[in-house]
Amino acid sequence: MIKVPNIILVGPMGAGKTTIGRLISQSMSKEFYDLDKVIEDNAGADIPWIFEREGEDGFRKRETQALTAIIQEDTGNSVLATGGGIVMRKENRDLLRDDALVVYLYASVSQQLYRTSKSTHRPLLQTGDPKATLRKLFEVRDPLYREVATLVIETDARHPKAVANKVLDAIKRHLNMETSVS
Ligand SMILES: Nc1ncnc2c1ncn2[C@@H]1O[C@H](COP(=O)(O)OP(=O)(O)O)[C@@H](O)[C@H]1O
Ligand SMILES: O=C(O)C1=C[C@@H](OP(=O)(O)O)[C@@H](O)[C@H](O)C1
Ligand SMILES: [Mg+2]
């Protein structure tokens, strides 16, 4: 029986981390955690409020605390959807690589923009030019997602269920390969 590690999803805003994370947790009968929701539950406030009152720095501190707690809990039986900025801090990147299988959900900037266009829950996108913001973030973060990722899954032109199936297949192939070479 192959032991399936914790699965952690990384990627830009709108890549589908929360949506796909929930779908694959159901298919794998694993616990699902959305890091943003954990942060909001811990704070008793939503993300826009945290950014407003504590700044992005305050949010990033909460993000690292929440990630640390989940990784330390290490049920070995969870799927974690992170927020798009999780890779910005080295301490987070080190935690991500710990014992989890990290999946980078890739989405083009135009798909990121399209999928987040109705959202008012993302303070970083409440700007005059969200496309320029997404492009700038992507230039900095894409290499960092790739640094921590075990698997990279393309999400453009795929419906959420098709992305979830793609992720599940890739995880199965990766784990079989690991056991076959060990
Ligand atoms: N592959 C996809 N194709 C089309 N829409 C998607 C896809 N993945 C997610 N979405 C939609 O995009 C929006 C953002 O998805 P979400 O899971 O919140 O992304 P993230 O957590 O990465 O920011 C949601 O409305 C979701 O339904
Ligand atoms: O990219 C970012 O810096 C952020 C992404 C958001 O999560 P999603 O990627 O789930 O939207 C949330 O953590 C916060 O608004 C900051
Ligand atoms: Mg999300």
Image (cartoon, grey):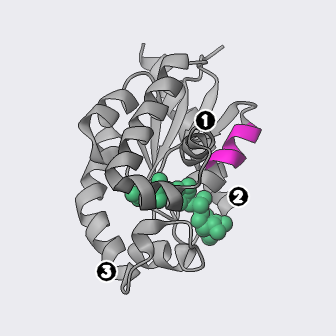
Residue extent of the magenta highlight: 21-27
**Residue 112: assigned label:** none
Within 10 Å of disc 2 (Cα), the crowding (few <14, some 14-19, many 20+) is: few
Residue 164 percent location from the top left of the image: 64, 51
Residue 42 colored in magenta in the image: no
Work out whether 122 lies above or below 131.
above
Identify which residue is drawn at 67% across, 37% down. 32
- Residue position for label 1: 79
Within 10 Å of disc 1 (Cα), the crowding (few <14, some 14-19, many 20+) is: many
Position of 145 with respect to 2 (left or right) is left
Residue 66 percent location from the top left of the image: 49, 33
Element under disc 3: helix
The three-letter amino acid code for the residue at tag 1 is: Val
Identify which residue is drawn at 51% across, 69% down. 156
State the separation of the CA atoms marked 2 and 1: 16 Å
- Residue position for label 3: 132
Residue 66 makes an appearance in the image: yes
The three-letter amino acid code for the residue at tag 2 is: Lys
Instruction: Please name which of the two marks, 1 or 3, marks the residue nearer to the observer.
Output: 3
Within 10 Å of disc 3 (Cα), the crowding (few <14, some 14-19, many 20+) is: some
Q: Earlier in the sequence, mark 1 or mark 3?
A: 1
- Cβ of mark 1 under 8 Å from ligand 1: the answer is no
The three-letter amino acid code for the residue at tag 3 is: Ala
- Residue position for label 2: 161
Residue 28 percent location from the top left of the image: 71, 33
